[in-house]
Image (cartoon, grey):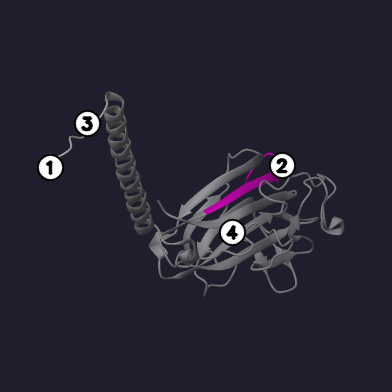
Amino acid sequence: MSTPTITTTPSEQATRFSRRGSTRWRLLWIVLAVVAATAVVLFVSSRSEDQPPLEDQPPLSNGGFETGDFTGWSTESWGRSGEWVVYEDGTTPPNPSLSDVDPPFDVPDPPQGKYAAVADMDSSGVRFLYRDIEVTGAWTLHAIVFYENGIETIYDPLYFGNFNGDAWFANVRTQQFRIDLVDPEAPIYSLEADDILATVFRTRSGDPQSLEPTPVTFDLSPWEGQTVRLRATQIDNAEAFRAGIDDVRLEWAD
């Protein structure tokens, strides 16, 4: 018996070649997809090694005062009238009985979120706003600061005046706003060199009468593994000096 001969027509051959080509293209696309997915996994893995996961970043609760109060913060005031307040409208004092009407309360609206903090007053004094920060990594401190001075001049002596528990007075002109990192064990009013670890922000003689909301940053990595106190201090004994702060937060240093 003879073996039958199988022949294919030109159209059948073309169909076979087309199927082989389609299979090769499918395999090529699969290989390319696997390579791309691998590259993405490697990139994400390398980025995760550069910075800690979000849950490892230290919380700084209520850094923007969005609770509408000073939860997470502490305040202290010296003088007859005045204190740090949380506000939401830059032309409406939250406590009118403590607010000077000449010049009236007129500060920038909260630069971030609904609320911000500002020192308001109706007489001379010193007002402290502070909190402790546990520096658990190479963190950068961020904040937004601003102020409105009732007179044209900034007076910047390293001096908070005198307070005897009942009354405050200053025997030199002082009109300023400063933010320091201080030793948590030091008295809140200390200006001793050993107690002030660093100055984050400070007004100086010659500065403008007002400052629009301005970001400031400060490297906290030298105090990694320690606890520091962030202290914002407003002082005035010439005219109302409304100093404000908002959006205080920590970020992983680049």
How far separated are the C-alphas under marks 2 and 1? 119 Å
Select label 3 or label 2 by which is in front.
3
Q: Secondary structure at mark 4?
A: loop
Q: Secondary structure at mark 1?
A: loop
In the image, 177 versus 55, the foreground residue is 55
Identify the residue under disc 3: 7
Identify the residue under disc 4: 159
First in sequence, mark 3 or 1: give its number: 1
The quadrant of the picture occupied by the N terminus is: top left
How far separated are the C-alphas under marks 4 and 2? 19 Å
Task: Identify the amino acid type marked 1.
Answer: Met
- Few, some or many C-alpha atoms within 10 Å of disc 1 (few <14, some 14-19, many ≥20)? few
Q: Secondary structure at mark 2?
A: loop
Identify the residue under disc 1: 1
Q: Was residue 154 drawn as part of the magenta stretch in this picture?
A: yes
Q: Residue furthest top?
A: 10
Q: Is residue 174 visible?
A: no
For the magenta stretch, what is the residue range? 142-155
Q: Looking at the picture, how far across and down is residue 240, in whole percent?
A: 75, 49
First in sequence, mark 3 or 2: give its number: 3
First in sequence, mark 4 or 1: give its number: 1
Select label 3 or label 1 by which is in front.
1
How far separated are the C-alphas under marks 3 and 2? 104 Å
Task: Identify the amino acid type marked 3.
Answer: Thr
Identify the residue under disc 2: 151
In the image, 132 versus 240, the foreground residue is 132
